[in-house]
Image: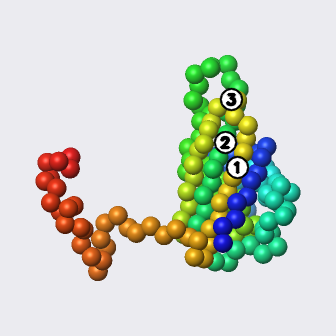
Amino acid sequence: MITVYSITGINPEPWVSPEGAIVRRNGKMFVQFYKSSGLMSYQSAIMEEIRLQNGHLPIAHKPLEEDAQITFWLWRELAQSDDKDSQRNVADATNMQKALEDALQGILYINDKRNIDIRTIIVEQSRTTYPNIQIEVRTGSDIQRLPPPLPVNDQPALPEWVTRIPETELF
């Protein structure tokens, strides 16, 4: 099955490291970590908006308990700043994927450990981009499985044409 979800008006945000504080409990001091308040707000908004904007699709009634292939397409609005050349707010795909994948756990899927293939495509990041997130979820026979690029263990050797390329041409 292939299902596409859309969330408009929510700006994709990158995952950030947890915030830490030294706390005392029972006379002992230790470091306690807290999820960033900005990240918590973003993830709450994702949870709310995916249900509101996609109520006609199979969502929170029963999150997936099977393997899934997920693709995120992200349009991100950059914050306005005085420095027109500033790249400070440009986020990378990996961190935006992590924040979004965590937010969808328990809604689209029971546990993100079942996401066997996940991809993130940044369509656009600019000050004039309208925030948008599109999510394609593939399950069952619709998962597009790619073979590994090199042989592993008992897999067949590389095709003959690969082994005939002189080493000097490879580098």
- Residue 34 shows in this picture: no
Considering depth in this image, is 39 or 150 the residue closer to the camera?
150
Q: Position of residue 81 (x, y in %)?
A: 68, 23
Looking at the image, do the residues carrying marks 2 and 1 touch, with CB atoms under 8 Å apart?
yes
Residue positioned 77% across, 46% down in the render: 8
Is 18 on the left-hand or right-hand side of 37?
left
Residue 98 appears in which quarter of the rendering? Answer: bottom right
- Residue nearest the observer in this picture, 156 or 34: 156
Image coordinates of residue 151 in percent, x first then y, are 30, 71
Per the model, the C-alpha gap separating discs 1 and 3 is 16 Å
Q: What residue type is labelled 3?
A: Arg
Rounded to the nearest whole Å, what is the CA distance between mark 2 and mark 1?
Answer: 6 Å
Question: Considering only order in the chain, which callout, 1 or 2, is on the residue closer to the N terminus?
Answer: 2
Q: Mark 2 points at which residue?
A: 75
Q: Is mark 1 on a helix, strand or loop?
A: strand
Q: Name the residue under label 3.
A: 127
User: Residue 67, located in which quarter of the rendered image?
Assistant: bottom right
Say whether residue 7 is left or right of residue 123: right
Instruction: Identify the colour scheme used.
Output: rainbow
The residue that label 1 is drawn on is 133
Q: Which of marks 1 and 3 is nearer the N terminus?
A: 3
